[in-house]
Image (cartoon, rainbow, N blue to C red):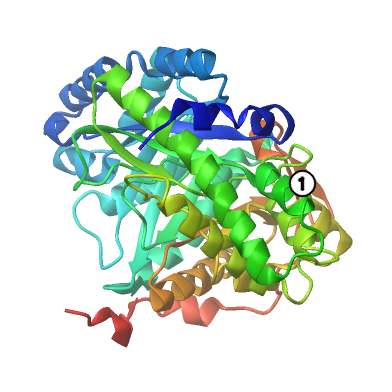
Amino acid sequence: MLNTGDILETIKMIQEENLDIRTITMGISLLDCIDSDIDRACDKVYEKMMRRAEHLVKTGEDIEKQYGIPIINKRISVTPIAIVSAATKQSPVKFAKTLQRVAEGTGVNYVGGYSALVHKGFSAGDKELIESIPEALAETKNVCSSVNIGSTKAGINMDAVAMMGKIIREASEKTAHDHCFGAAKIVVFCNAPEDNPFMAGAFHGVGEYDTEINVGVSGPGVVRAALQKHPDANISEIADVIKKTAFKITRMGQLVGTEASKRLGVPFGIVDLSLAPTPAVGDSVAHILEEIGLESCGAHGTTACLAMLNDAVKKGGVMASSHVGGLSGAFIPVSEDAGMIDAANRGSLSLEKLEAMTAVCSVGLDMIVIPGDTPADTISAIIADEAAIGMVNSKTTAVRVIPAIGMKEGDTLEFGGLFGSGPVMKVSSFSSSKFISRGGRIPAPLQSLKN
C-alpha cells in the first residue's frame, strides 16, 4: 500500500503550501475505569491514560523528524465521560480536572470526550454532565466537550437542544475574561462519529478498540495550489485535480497513522480526510472556492462548488487509505479560515449561507462568533436547524458558536493561534422561544427505516 518515495514527493507541499498532519489522536476506552467511588474512578482514569499515552507526543515528534512532516497537534479522545461518571452519582467536574492533569502530564494539546450521547433521551449521568460543562471548561484549559443531540435513526432530542443553548451561553459568560473560549471548546452534534480525531468534538466510541490511533490530515493550501495550475480547466477536470491531490495528502496520513500505530503498539483506526484550514495565508477552504471561480466565498454558486470539492476529496482520499472515517470532507470554521474571515467581513458570507453550505460539506456551523446578547433560545434554534440538516441527509452536522459577551455585530473576537479571530456575525432578531420551549423529540425521518 505504502511507498515512502511517493510520500517524500510531497515535500514541496509541506514547505510551500501549508500541508500538514493536523492531528494524531489516541482514542482510549475508559469503560474499565468505571467505579461507584469517584476518587477511585478518577485514579483509574488517570493511571490508564498516562500509561497508554505516555509516549504519544514523543512518537509524533519522532515521526515528524524522520519524515519531515509537520504534525501540528497530538491529542487524546476518551469514552464519553457521562458513561463513566454515571456510576458515581456525583458532579463529573472532578473527571474534567483529571483529564486536564493527563493533558499536562502527557503534553498533548487537547483531550476530548467530556461528552454525552443523548440523541434519543437522557440516561443516568447525562444531565449532570451537560449541566456541568460550563464549570468544567472554565476550570480546565485543554479539555473539550461534545454532546450528540440527534441522529437519523432517533430524531432530535429537543429537550437536549434547549439545554445546550443555555449551556453555550453560560460557558461563554464563565470565560468572558478569556475571549469566551469555553464556548469554543463545545460542539453539539447530530450523527456524531465515534472515531473523529478533530477537536473539539472528538470522543472514543464504545464500539472502538480499547486504544487506537486516528489521524486527521489537512491540505487546503495544497489543493488551491494544484488548481492554480489549471486556470482554464472545466469543472470535471477540476474535480479530477482535487481527487488526485487528495490521494497524495491522504497517503501521507496513512503513513503517519501506520507508523504511530506500530511504534505505540496500538491498532490503527482511521484517517480523517477533512480539509482543515488555519488562519495562515494560503491555507483556506474559502480560497479554494474562489480559485474555482467565485469572486468571494458566499456568492451564489458557493454551495455547488463546496459540494464538488467535498465529493472529490472523499473520492481521492478513500483510494489512498485502508480505513477512512471520522468526518472526512471540508471544514468551514469561520474564525480558523482566513478566506472565511475576509468573506464575512466584506459581507458576502452570512450565517444563512453557511447553513446552506453545511448541507453538502463535512460538518456544520463551526467557530462562528455571534453577538453577546444572543438569547439562549436562539442558539438552541440554530442547533435545531443544523441538526435537522444532518438528520434528514444522514450525515454528521454540528454547531460550535461563540456568543461574544459584550460584543455586537461588526466587532471582532480574537482567539489567537490555530483558532484565529472571528468577526461577530449577524443573527436574526426574531424569536424562536416558543418553538424551543415545547420540548419533546422531533421524530426520525422516513429514511431512517432502512432495516
Are there few (<14), some (14-19), or many (20+) residues within 10 Å of tag 1? Answer: many
Left or right of 208? Residue 304 is right
Give the answer, above or below, for where 327 lies relative to 90. Answer: below
Q: Which residue is mark 1?
A: 338
* Nearer to me, 40 or 369: 369
Left or right of 105? Residue 329 is right
Q: Residue at x 36, y 24 (%)?
A: 259
* Nearer to me, 249 or 265: 249
Where is residue 319? Give x, y as percent: 41, 51
Q: Quadrant of residue 366?
A: bottom right
Q: Amino acid at mark 1?
A: Ala
| Quadrant of the rendering where the C terminus is positioned | bottom left
Q: Residue at x 57, y 64 (%)?
A: 379
Left or right of 137? Residue 114 is left
Q: Quadrant of residue 378?
A: bottom right
Where is residue 251? Give x, y as percent: 46, 39
Where is residue 105? Give x, y as percent: 39, 13
Where is residue 225? Give x, y as percent: 74, 45
